[in-house]
Image (cartoon, rainbow, N blue to C red):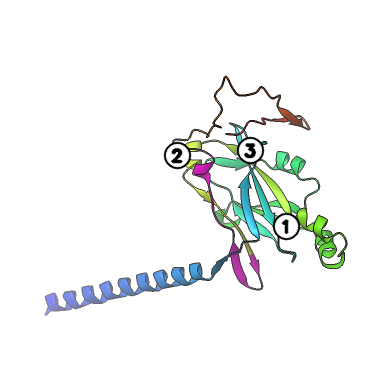
Amino acid sequence: MTLNKRNIMFRLLLLAVMGIQLIVTTGTSLAESSIKVDSDLALTSDQELSNKKQIVIRVSDQLKAQRDLGLTIPEGATFDRTTSNQLNKKSAYTAILDQKNNSNQVILKQTAQTAENIENDSVNRQATTSKKEYLLVFKLKDTSIFAKQQLKVTTIMDGVHYESKPLLLKDIVGTDGVQRQTSLSKEDTPQIAPMSINGTSFSKHSF
């Protein structure tokens, strides 16, 4: 009797564990299916401002409606807020570091003035909309980890989660952690002086 009871208890426990796994899997699938890819959101690398020590990512949103954007800082890199602020003095966004619950996210909050201009100023709407972008500067610490990840910019509008198409970091930094070079050889590569912005130097060579 004791052996049978143990078998029954073990089977009940196993069924309970399987039930919990099924609930978690179903919940995750539903959450992922509720996220929509938004073609108005885009992430691109800025080759002119990037170099061996940093990667500059351009975030842009072509939608006229006001919405804040979020992007998780990839492992192997740190967000350079000082340099980013220098590059984005005329941007429609303000960058805020959100480190609650170890999310390690950069939140781009759109200014109220910009939102009002987009809604009311039809004459300058095109010019205002074109400013809905932000340059994120990431200092590289470990390119071997960095290259194995991907970036997505996310947002919520009317209760719906949206995200951009992923930017594959291996396309910027090789899977072996070596930054990609242009097709020009060293002998053919023109010598271009680095560009300096408020004391911060940027190489104009692409990867």
How far is the residue under mark 1 from the one under mark 2? Answer: 33 Å
- Which residue is denoted by mark 3 in the rendering? 47
Q: Which amino acid does label 2 sit on?
A: Thr
Question: Which element carries disc 2, helix, strand or loop?
Answer: loop
Q: Give the range drawn in magenta.
A: 156-175
Sequence-wise, the earlier of marks 1 and 2 is 1
How far is the residue under mark 3 from the one under mark 2? Answer: 18 Å
The residue under the point 66% across, 22% down is 191
Sequence-wise, the earlier of marks 3 and 2 is 3
Identify the image quadrant of the C terminus.
top right
Please name whichever residue, 83 or 55, is drawn nearer the observer in this view of the structure: 55
Evaluate if marks 3 and 1 touch, with contact meaning CB atoms under 8 Å apart.
no
Against 77, residue 91 (above or below) is: below
Residue 32 in sight from this viewpoint: yes
Against 110, residue 178 (above or below) is: above
- Crowding at dot 3, Cα within 10 Å, few <14 / some 14-19 / many 20+, comes out as some
Against 190, residue 115 (above or below) is: below
Sequence-wise, the earlier of marks 3 and 1 is 3
Q: Nearer the viewer, mark 3 or mark 2?
A: 3
Residue 158 is a magenta residue: yes
Residue 138 horizontal side relative to residue 10, left or right = right
Q: Residue extending furthest bottom?
A: 1
Q: What residue type is labelled 1?
A: Lys
The residue under the point 80% across, 63% down is 115
- Which residue is denoted by mark 1 in the rendering? 109
Residue 151 horizontal side relative to residue 9, left or right = right
Q: What residue type is labelled 3?
A: Gln
Q: Position of residue 145 (x, y in %)?
A: 47, 41
- Which residue is denoted by mark 2 in the rendering? 175
- Crowding at dot 2, Cα within 10 Å, few <14 / some 14-19 / many 20+, comes out as some
